[in-house]
Amino acid sequence: MNTYNDAANQDVIFTVSQITDLIKEILETSFRTITIEGEISNWRPSAAGHVYFTLKDNNAQIKAVIFRGSASKLSFKPKDGDKVRCLGSISVYAPQGNYQIIINTMELAGFGNILQMIEERKRKLAAEGLFDESKKRSLPLFPNTIGVVTSPTGAAIRDILNVTKRRNRCVNVVVLPAIVQGDGAAQTIVKMIELANFYNLCDVLIVGRGGGSLEDLLPFSEESVVRAVSKSEIPVISAVGHEIDWALCDYAADRRAPTPSAAAEMAVPVLADVQQNIFSYKDDLYNSIKQHVYKTRLMIKSFNPENMEIQFRNIQTPLLNRYGNARENIVKNMQDKIKDLKTRIKNSMTILENAGPQTILKRGYSMVTDKNGNIIRSSAQVAVGNEIIIKPAEGKIVAVVKQ
Protein backbone atom coordinates (compact mmCIF):
# COMPACT_ATOMS: atom_id res chain seq x y z
CA MET A 1 0.00 0.00 0.00
CA ASN A 2 1.29 3.47 -0.88
CA THR A 3 1.76 5.38 2.35
CA TYR A 4 1.44 8.79 0.71
CA ASN A 5 -1.86 7.82 -0.94
CA ASP A 6 -3.13 6.45 2.35
CA ALA A 7 -2.30 9.76 3.99
CA ALA A 8 -4.41 11.52 1.39
CA ASN A 9 -7.36 9.20 2.04
CA GLN A 10 -9.62 10.76 4.66
CA ASP A 11 -10.99 7.33 5.62
CA VAL A 12 -7.57 6.19 6.92
CA ILE A 13 -6.94 6.86 10.59
CA PHE A 14 -3.30 7.33 11.76
CA THR A 15 -1.81 7.26 15.19
CA VAL A 16 0.41 10.11 16.26
CA SER A 17 3.45 7.89 15.95
CA GLN A 18 2.46 6.81 12.45
CA ILE A 19 1.97 10.32 11.13
CA THR A 20 5.17 11.45 12.85
CA ASP A 21 7.10 8.58 11.31
CA LEU A 22 5.61 9.47 7.94
CA ILE A 23 6.70 13.11 8.28
CA LYS A 24 10.14 11.96 9.47
CA GLU A 25 10.51 9.69 6.44
CA ILE A 26 9.45 12.39 4.01
CA LEU A 27 11.72 15.09 5.48
CA GLU A 28 14.79 13.00 6.14
CA THR A 29 14.74 11.30 2.74
CA SER A 30 13.97 14.51 0.87
CA PHE A 31 16.57 16.71 2.65
CA ARG A 32 19.53 14.41 3.27
CA THR A 33 22.00 17.20 2.47
CA ILE A 34 20.95 20.85 2.28
CA THR A 35 22.58 24.26 2.40
CA ILE A 36 20.69 26.86 4.36
CA GLU A 37 21.32 30.52 5.24
CA GLY A 38 19.95 32.37 8.20
CA GLU A 39 20.66 34.46 11.27
CA ILE A 40 21.85 32.87 14.51
CA SER A 41 19.58 33.33 17.51
CA ASN A 42 19.77 31.93 21.06
CA TRP A 43 23.26 30.41 20.65
CA ARG A 44 23.58 27.90 23.54
CA PRO A 45 26.72 25.75 23.91
CA SER A 46 26.20 22.77 26.22
CA ALA A 47 28.55 21.23 28.76
CA ALA A 48 28.93 18.18 26.50
CA GLY A 49 30.32 20.34 23.69
CA HIS A 50 27.20 20.33 21.51
CA VAL A 51 25.66 23.65 20.49
CA TYR A 52 21.93 24.35 20.16
CA PHE A 53 20.55 27.45 18.49
CA THR A 54 17.93 28.79 16.10
CA LEU A 55 18.32 29.85 12.47
CA LYS A 56 15.86 32.52 11.41
CA ASP A 57 14.99 35.03 8.76
CA ASN A 58 12.26 37.67 8.56
CA ASN A 59 9.43 35.13 8.18
CA ALA A 60 10.41 31.85 9.79
CA GLN A 61 12.83 29.98 12.02
CA ILE A 62 14.20 26.47 12.41
CA LYS A 63 15.97 24.80 15.31
CA ALA A 64 19.53 23.67 14.71
CA VAL A 65 22.22 21.68 16.43
CA ILE A 66 25.96 21.24 15.90
CA PHE A 67 27.40 18.21 17.61
CA ARG A 68 30.70 18.43 19.44
CA GLY A 69 32.90 17.04 16.66
CA SER A 70 31.63 19.53 14.09
CA ALA A 71 31.54 22.41 16.59
CA SER A 72 35.25 21.99 17.37
CA LYS A 73 36.11 22.43 13.67
CA LEU A 74 34.44 25.83 13.22
CA SER A 75 36.85 28.46 11.85
CA PHE A 76 35.18 31.34 13.74
CA LYS A 77 33.36 32.02 16.99
CA PRO A 78 29.64 32.31 16.19
CA LYS A 79 27.38 34.65 18.11
CA ASP A 80 23.79 35.82 18.06
CA GLY A 81 23.06 38.03 15.07
CA ASP A 82 25.65 36.43 12.77
CA LYS A 83 24.35 35.55 9.32
CA VAL A 84 25.66 32.10 8.45
CA ARG A 85 25.57 29.51 5.67
CA CYS A 86 25.20 25.93 6.94
CA LEU A 87 25.52 22.49 5.37
CA GLY A 88 23.55 19.72 7.05
CA SER A 89 20.48 17.49 7.01
CA ILE A 90 16.89 17.68 8.32
CA SER A 91 16.03 15.47 11.28
CA VAL A 92 12.73 14.88 13.07
CA TYR A 93 12.74 14.26 16.81
CA ALA A 94 9.65 12.09 17.22
CA PRO A 95 9.21 12.22 21.07
CA GLN A 96 8.60 15.99 20.89
CA GLY A 97 7.29 16.21 17.35
CA ASN A 98 9.98 18.75 16.43
CA TYR A 99 12.15 18.95 13.37
CA GLN A 100 15.62 20.51 13.25
CA ILE A 101 18.66 20.74 11.06
CA ILE A 102 21.78 18.86 12.07
CA ILE A 103 24.69 21.01 10.90
CA ASN A 104 27.99 19.57 9.73
CA THR A 105 29.77 22.72 8.56
CA MET A 106 29.09 26.43 8.98
CA GLU A 107 30.66 29.66 7.74
CA LEU A 108 29.73 33.32 7.80
CA ALA A 109 27.28 33.92 5.00
CA GLY A 110 28.64 36.19 2.33
CA PHE A 111 31.96 36.53 4.20
CA GLY A 112 33.75 33.38 3.12
CA ASN A 113 35.27 35.02 0.07
CA ILE A 114 35.96 38.20 2.02
CA LEU A 115 37.84 36.33 4.74
CA GLN A 116 39.87 34.46 2.16
CA MET A 117 40.67 37.71 0.35
CA ILE A 118 41.74 39.40 3.59
CA GLU A 119 43.92 36.44 4.54
CA GLU A 120 45.66 36.47 1.15
CA ARG A 121 46.19 40.22 1.42
CA LYS A 122 47.58 39.78 4.91
CA ARG A 123 50.16 37.26 3.70
CA LYS A 124 51.17 39.54 0.84
CA LEU A 125 51.65 42.64 3.00
CA ALA A 126 53.42 40.65 5.72
CA ALA A 127 55.88 39.36 3.12
CA GLU A 128 56.66 42.99 2.23
CA GLY A 129 57.54 43.68 5.87
CA LEU A 130 54.66 46.07 6.62
CA PHE A 131 53.84 44.23 9.85
CA ASP A 132 57.39 43.82 11.18
CA GLU A 133 57.72 44.46 14.91
CA SER A 134 61.01 46.28 14.28
CA LYS A 135 59.04 49.08 12.63
CA LYS A 136 56.79 49.68 15.64
CA ARG A 137 57.46 52.99 17.40
CA SER A 138 56.80 54.08 20.96
CA LEU A 139 53.95 56.47 21.62
CA PRO A 140 54.89 59.95 22.92
CA LEU A 141 54.75 60.22 26.71
CA PHE A 142 53.24 63.71 26.77
CA PRO A 143 51.31 64.40 23.55
CA ASN A 144 49.93 67.88 23.05
CA THR A 145 47.52 66.93 20.27
CA ILE A 146 45.71 63.72 19.38
CA GLY A 147 44.52 63.23 15.81
CA VAL A 148 41.47 61.02 15.19
CA VAL A 149 40.60 59.65 11.75
CA THR A 150 36.98 58.50 12.06
CA SER A 151 33.40 59.48 11.41
CA PRO A 152 32.64 62.86 13.02
CA THR A 153 29.13 61.66 13.93
CA GLY A 154 29.89 58.15 15.17
CA ALA A 155 30.08 56.79 18.69
CA ALA A 156 33.85 56.32 18.40
CA ILE A 157 34.66 60.05 18.39
CA ARG A 158 32.31 60.68 21.32
CA ASP A 159 34.01 57.96 23.33
CA ILE A 160 37.49 59.32 22.48
CA LEU A 161 36.50 62.88 23.40
CA ASN A 162 34.96 61.77 26.69
CA VAL A 163 38.01 59.71 27.67
CA THR A 164 40.43 62.49 26.67
CA LYS A 165 38.48 65.13 28.59
CA ARG A 166 38.35 62.92 31.66
CA ARG A 167 42.04 61.98 31.62
CA ASN A 168 43.72 65.21 30.54
CA ARG A 169 42.01 68.51 29.65
CA CYS A 170 45.32 69.92 28.42
CA VAL A 171 45.44 67.54 25.43
CA ASN A 172 43.90 68.83 22.21
CA VAL A 173 41.93 66.61 19.83
CA VAL A 174 41.93 67.17 16.06
CA VAL A 175 39.12 65.33 14.27
CA LEU A 176 39.97 64.30 10.71
CA PRO A 177 36.53 63.38 9.32
CA ALA A 178 36.36 60.26 7.19
CA ILE A 179 33.80 57.85 5.79
CA VAL A 180 34.32 54.63 7.72
CA GLN A 181 32.21 52.17 5.69
CA GLY A 182 30.94 51.67 2.20
CA ASP A 183 32.13 53.09 -1.11
CA GLY A 184 34.90 55.66 -0.92
CA ALA A 185 35.68 54.94 2.74
CA ALA A 186 39.23 53.70 2.15
CA GLN A 187 40.08 56.73 0.01
CA THR A 188 38.96 59.23 2.65
CA ILE A 189 40.78 57.34 5.44
CA VAL A 190 44.01 57.39 3.42
CA LYS A 191 43.53 61.07 2.60
CA MET A 192 43.09 62.02 6.26
CA ILE A 193 46.19 60.03 7.34
CA GLU A 194 48.27 61.73 4.63
CA LEU A 195 46.82 65.13 5.55
CA ALA A 196 47.77 64.69 9.22
CA ASN A 197 51.34 63.79 8.22
CA PHE A 198 51.72 66.51 5.60
CA TYR A 199 50.75 69.31 8.01
CA ASN A 200 52.08 67.53 11.12
CA LEU A 201 48.72 68.07 12.82
CA CYS A 202 49.25 65.86 15.87
CA ASP A 203 51.67 63.87 18.00
CA VAL A 204 49.78 60.57 17.77
CA LEU A 205 47.07 59.42 15.37
CA ILE A 206 44.06 57.22 16.22
CA VAL A 207 42.53 55.48 13.18
CA GLY A 208 39.33 53.56 13.69
CA ARG A 209 35.60 53.32 14.24
CA GLY A 210 33.02 51.60 16.42
CA GLY A 211 31.85 48.04 15.99
CA GLY A 212 30.14 46.63 12.94
CA SER A 213 29.90 43.67 10.62
CA LEU A 214 32.88 42.32 8.73
CA GLU A 215 31.68 44.17 5.64
CA ASP A 216 31.41 47.42 7.65
CA LEU A 217 34.99 47.08 8.86
CA LEU A 218 36.37 46.08 5.44
CA PRO A 219 37.75 49.57 4.51
CA PHE A 220 40.29 49.27 7.34
CA SER A 221 41.66 46.13 5.66
CA GLU A 222 42.06 47.79 2.26
CA GLU A 223 45.64 47.68 0.99
CA SER A 224 45.79 51.46 0.53
CA VAL A 225 44.78 52.05 4.16
CA VAL A 226 47.28 49.51 5.48
CA ARG A 227 50.09 51.10 3.47
CA ALA A 228 49.12 54.60 4.63
CA VAL A 229 49.17 53.46 8.27
CA SER A 230 52.56 51.78 7.82
CA LYS A 231 54.01 54.81 6.01
CA SER A 232 52.77 57.36 8.58
CA GLU A 233 55.55 59.30 10.29
CA ILE A 234 53.14 60.01 13.15
CA PRO A 235 52.72 57.02 15.50
CA VAL A 236 49.39 55.31 14.80
CA ILE A 237 46.96 53.51 17.12
CA SER A 238 44.49 51.27 15.29
CA ALA A 239 41.11 51.11 17.03
CA VAL A 240 38.72 49.28 14.73
CA GLY A 241 35.48 47.91 16.16
CA HIS A 242 35.26 46.00 19.41
CA GLU A 243 37.76 43.69 21.05
CA ILE A 244 36.74 40.65 18.97
CA ASP A 245 36.92 42.61 15.70
CA TRP A 246 40.07 42.92 13.68
CA ALA A 247 41.39 44.58 10.53
CA LEU A 248 44.68 44.52 8.64
CA CYS A 249 45.56 48.04 9.75
CA ASP A 250 45.80 46.58 13.29
CA TYR A 251 48.96 44.76 12.18
CA ALA A 252 50.52 47.77 10.46
CA ALA A 253 49.83 50.26 13.28
CA ASP A 254 52.33 50.96 16.06
CA ARG A 255 49.70 49.93 18.62
CA ARG A 256 46.38 48.10 18.42
CA ALA A 257 43.57 49.08 20.79
CA PRO A 258 40.53 46.84 21.38
CA THR A 259 38.16 49.83 21.26
CA PRO A 260 38.32 53.56 20.45
CA SER A 261 38.02 54.32 24.18
CA ALA A 262 41.01 52.09 24.89
CA ALA A 263 42.94 53.90 22.15
CA ALA A 264 42.31 57.23 23.89
CA GLU A 265 43.52 55.72 27.17
CA MET A 266 46.71 54.53 25.44
CA ALA A 267 47.40 57.90 23.86
CA VAL A 268 46.43 60.30 26.63
CA PRO A 269 48.20 60.18 30.01
CA VAL A 270 46.19 61.00 33.12
CA LEU A 271 46.97 64.62 34.00
CA ALA A 272 46.80 63.95 37.74
CA ASP A 273 49.32 61.11 37.38
CA VAL A 274 51.67 63.31 35.33
CA GLN A 275 51.45 66.09 37.91
CA GLN A 276 52.03 63.62 40.73
CA ASN A 277 55.11 62.24 38.95
CA ILE A 278 56.44 65.76 38.39
CA PHE A 279 55.95 66.63 42.08
CA SER A 280 57.65 63.38 43.06
CA TYR A 281 60.59 64.05 40.72
CA LYS A 282 60.80 67.62 42.04
CA ASP A 283 61.00 66.40 45.64
CA ASP A 284 63.63 63.80 44.72
CA LEU A 285 65.69 66.42 42.89
CA TYR A 286 65.40 68.91 45.75
CA ASN A 287 66.46 66.30 48.33
CA SER A 288 69.35 65.19 46.14
CA ILE A 289 70.62 68.77 45.71
CA LYS A 290 70.16 69.47 49.41
CA GLN A 291 72.18 66.38 50.34
CA HIS A 292 74.89 67.28 47.87
CA VAL A 293 75.12 70.85 49.22
CA TYR A 294 75.34 69.51 52.77
CA LYS A 295 78.21 67.18 51.88
CA THR A 296 79.98 69.99 49.99
CA ARG A 297 79.71 72.31 53.01
CA LEU A 298 81.24 69.64 55.24
CA MET A 299 84.11 69.28 52.82
CA ILE A 300 84.66 73.05 52.57
CA LYS A 301 84.49 73.43 56.36
CA SER A 302 87.46 71.14 56.76
CA PHE A 303 89.60 73.38 54.52
CA ASN A 304 90.46 76.23 57.02
CA PRO A 305 94.08 77.60 57.03
CA GLU A 306 95.23 75.38 59.91
CA ASN A 307 93.74 72.23 58.44
CA MET A 308 94.98 73.18 55.01
CA GLU A 309 98.59 73.41 56.34
CA ILE A 310 98.27 70.08 58.13
CA GLN A 311 96.82 68.43 55.06
CA PHE A 312 99.53 70.01 52.92
CA ARG A 313 102.19 68.70 55.32
CA ASN A 314 100.59 65.28 55.25
CA ILE A 315 100.90 65.31 51.49
CA GLN A 316 104.33 66.97 51.38
CA THR A 317 106.17 64.89 54.04
CA PRO A 318 105.91 61.52 52.28
CA LEU A 319 106.98 63.15 49.05
CA LEU A 320 110.00 64.81 50.70
CA ASN A 321 110.96 61.51 52.31
CA ARG A 322 110.77 59.78 48.98
CA TYR A 323 112.86 62.57 47.42
CA GLY A 324 115.52 62.35 50.18
CA ASN A 325 115.75 58.58 49.92
CA ALA A 326 116.01 58.76 46.18
CA ARG A 327 118.76 61.42 46.41
CA GLU A 328 120.79 59.35 48.89
CA ASN A 329 120.43 56.27 46.72
CA ILE A 330 121.62 58.18 43.66
CA VAL A 331 124.68 59.61 45.49
CA LYS A 332 125.59 56.22 46.93
CA ASN A 333 125.23 54.54 43.56
CA MET A 334 127.45 57.20 41.95
CA GLN A 335 130.11 56.82 44.66
CA ASP A 336 130.11 53.06 44.26
CA LYS A 337 130.45 53.44 40.50
CA ILE A 338 133.39 55.88 40.89
CA LYS A 339 135.14 53.60 43.39
CA ASP A 340 134.71 50.64 41.06
CA LEU A 341 136.07 52.62 38.10
CA LYS A 342 139.12 53.78 40.13
CA THR A 343 139.91 50.20 41.07
CA ARG A 344 139.61 49.03 37.49
CA ILE A 345 141.85 51.90 36.25
CA LYS A 346 144.49 51.14 38.89
CA ASN A 347 144.51 47.46 37.97
CA SER A 348 144.82 48.34 34.29
CA MET A 349 147.74 50.70 34.97
CA THR A 350 149.54 47.97 36.94
CA ILE A 351 149.07 45.52 34.11
CA LEU A 352 150.34 48.09 31.59
CA GLU A 353 153.37 48.97 33.73
CA ASN A 354 154.31 45.32 34.19
CA ALA A 355 154.04 44.75 30.46
CA GLY A 356 156.17 47.86 29.55
CA PRO A 357 159.69 47.45 27.93
CA GLN A 358 161.47 49.46 30.61
CA THR A 359 160.13 47.19 33.34
CA ILE A 360 161.36 44.16 31.45
CA LEU A 361 164.82 45.73 30.99
CA LYS A 362 165.04 46.43 34.70
CA ARG A 363 164.68 42.73 35.30
CA GLY A 364 168.10 42.19 33.60
CA TYR A 365 167.08 41.92 30.02
CA SER A 366 168.72 44.00 27.21
CA MET A 367 167.64 45.04 23.74
CA VAL A 368 170.12 44.50 20.83
CA THR A 369 170.05 46.63 17.68
CA ASP A 370 172.32 47.19 14.75
CA LYS A 371 173.96 50.53 14.26
CA ASN A 372 170.90 51.63 12.28
CA GLY A 373 168.57 50.97 15.24
CA ASN A 374 166.98 47.79 13.83
CA ILE A 375 166.13 45.29 16.55
CA ILE A 376 168.05 42.05 16.19
CA ARG A 377 165.88 39.07 17.03
CA SER A 378 168.11 36.32 15.44
CA SER A 379 171.82 35.69 15.00
CA ALA A 380 171.15 35.29 11.32
CA GLN A 381 170.60 39.05 11.15
CA VAL A 382 174.32 39.84 11.83
CA ALA A 383 177.72 38.70 10.58
CA VAL A 384 181.16 38.52 12.14
CA GLY A 385 182.64 41.98 12.35
CA ASN A 386 179.23 43.79 12.46
CA GLU A 387 178.87 46.51 15.03
CA ILE A 388 175.92 46.06 17.39
CA ILE A 389 174.49 48.18 20.14
CA ILE A 390 173.30 46.59 23.43
CA LYS A 391 170.80 48.59 25.47
CA PRO A 392 170.38 47.46 29.12
CA ALA A 393 168.00 49.27 31.57
CA GLU A 394 170.45 52.18 31.79
CA GLY A 395 172.98 53.35 29.19
CA LYS A 396 174.16 51.39 26.12
CA ILE A 397 177.05 49.13 25.07
CA VAL A 398 178.67 49.13 21.64
CA ALA A 399 180.19 45.79 20.62
CA VAL A 400 181.59 43.97 17.57
CA VAL A 401 180.44 40.46 16.64
CA LYS A 402 183.31 37.99 16.73
CA GLN A 403 181.37 34.74 16.42
Image: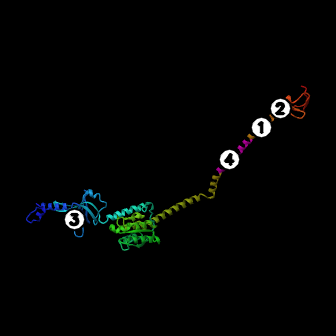
What's the amino acid at mark 4?
Ala
At horizontal 33% and vertical 68% (from top left) the residue drawn is: 215
Choose mark 1 or mark 3, whichever is in front: 3
Choose mark 4 or mark 2, whichever is in front: 2
Residue denoted by label 4: 326
Residues at marks 1 and 3 touching, judged by CB atoms closer than 8 Å: no
Residue denoted by label 2: 360
Choose mark 1 or mark 4, whichever is in front: 1
Crowd rating for badge 3 (residues with CA inside 10 Å; few <14, some 14–19, many 20+):
some
Query: Residue 121, percent across and down?
Result: 38, 63
64 in the magenta segment:
no
Q: CA distance from mark 2 to mark 1?
A: 17 Å
Q: Which mark is residue 348?
A: 1
Q: Quadrant of residue 91?
A: bottom left
Q: Which mark is residue 221?
A: none
What's the amino acid at mark 1?
Ser
323 in the magenta segment:
yes
Residues at marks 2 and 1 touching, judged by CB atoms closer than 8 Å: no
